[in-house]
Image: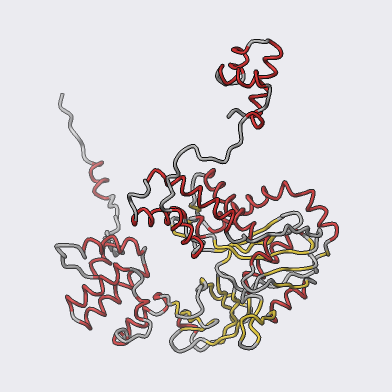
Amino acid sequence: MITKQQYRKLMNEYQATGNVTNSALKAAMSRPTARKYVTAAQPPPELQAKHNWRTRKDPLVEIWPHAEAMLAEAPDLEAKTLFEHLWERSPWAVQEKHLRTFQRRVKLWRLAHGADLEVFFAQDWEAGRALQLDWTNADELGITIAGEPYAHLLCHCVLPHSNWEWATRCRSESLLSLRQGLQAGLHRLGKVTRELRVDNSSAATHRIGGGETARTFNEPFASLCAHYGLLPQTIGIACPNENGDVESSNGHLKRRLRQHLLLRGSRDFDTEAAYEGFLEKMLERSNQGRQEKLAAELAVMQALPPTRLSEYDEVICRVGSGSTIRIKKVGYSVPARLIGQELKVEVYERELKLYSGRELLLCLPRHTGNQGMVLDYRHVIDHLLRKPGAFERYRYREQMFPSRLLRSAYDHLITQQGQRRGTVEYLRLLKLVSEVDASRVEVMLADYLSPPYPAWSVAELRDVLQPRPQSPVDLAELQPEWRSYDALLSQEVAYAN
């Protein structure tokens, strides 16, 4: 059947020229078809006869009653799966080429008898009223930092009226990441909305009693909202659609990031700061087309408070005899010179800063979990060399193997030299790794730990990687003697011609 546009083109050309052949060519149809419509002078919907009879035998006549019964019992069955099941049971009743016909029949059945789908009600948001906040997992973007996979989330803020958005990198759905993301968004805007809408994450809410459905806001989160004059609101349990603007924007944000990464030609960044700059540039570009509605929101929003809250928690701890501290249920090793000292620790989302009074002593990367021990072998290797017997039953011994190759080296040394001598030799190897580039040591070890397993020692590795400077040769100071030269000048010299 021709389209309405083709019919109009045909009739216009025929009225202008009176030539059916030329009119048919210009309307992209055959001459017999053109002649039929010109003669009838009726458009396609009127000319085509309506009928309710079949023009060919129904190929699904034998399997459709069974299919309809199974769909009524299990409406979620997919058409292809159901077709393959019925075909296996009755291969003579239907052919594989009828799959598309079967899929159309199932679609029509669902339209007539299927369950209702969820209805989404479009919302009109008042300008400047609310800010929605949510986290979204960004691992699917495949970002790497210096070649290493970068696992992270994005704390995403959205203004529903204008769709203005901002996002910050974070490692978990924590109160620290919420505080950092919220303040980054608000200070980027320069104004504050009246409401803040979040989901029921444990960063903002906690259970009341034993029921999961009864939740209230955490005191730290409520204090954060009070500082900015925000009225906190949450959504129903397991009802993300109630925060639909930011939930939808999560997908749009990651789609745009994927597109810009494709334009960039690489998903690898030299540093986290470089990736953050890329993210901010992309967000600024996205927000450029929302300035008109954003201006309407900013006009009715509140002013920011004069101060910005700190983006860290402060913890006081004492360094134990094992040269470790415990921060939020996670242990960390520190240099042994700090044993017995009381330290102030600023707990950021990604790092820990250790202070003695106002003096910053060191920074440590923060562990993402809520339990365990993070041990840096450099902090204890010197002391284990003085007490090698403690290594065998050391509680955190497994963390003294920074790589699989070093673990293989330990097993090799124990096999070749016995438990005690092998342990001492491994600790010497670990000391060498702490003093030079670990990759240089591992390159040499890879040869020594492969067939035919040549003999080696840590002393030999040290001589190669840290050669001792040769002492300079002591040369006697030259003392010129002029008397013999003067005596030579006093002698007569005869010249022969």
Residue at image point 74% right, 49% down: 290
The answer to whether residue 52 is above or below residue 318 is: above
Q: Residue at x 73, y 78 (%)?
A: 223
Question: What number of labels is visible?
Answer: 0
Camera-side residue of 427 and 241: 241
**Residue 424: x percent and y percent?**
26, 79
Q: Is residue 447 left or right of residue 150?
A: left
Front residue of this view, candidates 296 and 351: 296
Left-right relation of 152 to 46: left
Residue 394 against residue 399 in the figure, above or below: below
Which color scheme is applied?
secondary structure
Image quarter (top left, top right, bottom left or bottom right) of the N terminus: top right
On screen, 13 above or below 110? above
**In the orientation shown, which residue stands out farthest toward the front?**
53
The image position of residue 130, as x and y in percent, is 76, 64
Give the image quarter of residue 310: bottom right
Image quadrant occupied by the C terminus: top left
Pick the residue in front: 364 or 126: 126
Does 268 sit left or right of 473 as displayed?
Answer: right
Where residue 193 sits: x, y (%)? 79, 64
Q: Residue 475 falls in which quadrant of the image?
A: bottom left
Q: Residue at x 64, y 61 (%)?
A: 118
- Farthest residue to the right: give it: 300
Q: Residue at x 80, y 63 (%)?
A: 129
Percent from the top left, x then y, of residue 175?
Answer: 63, 74
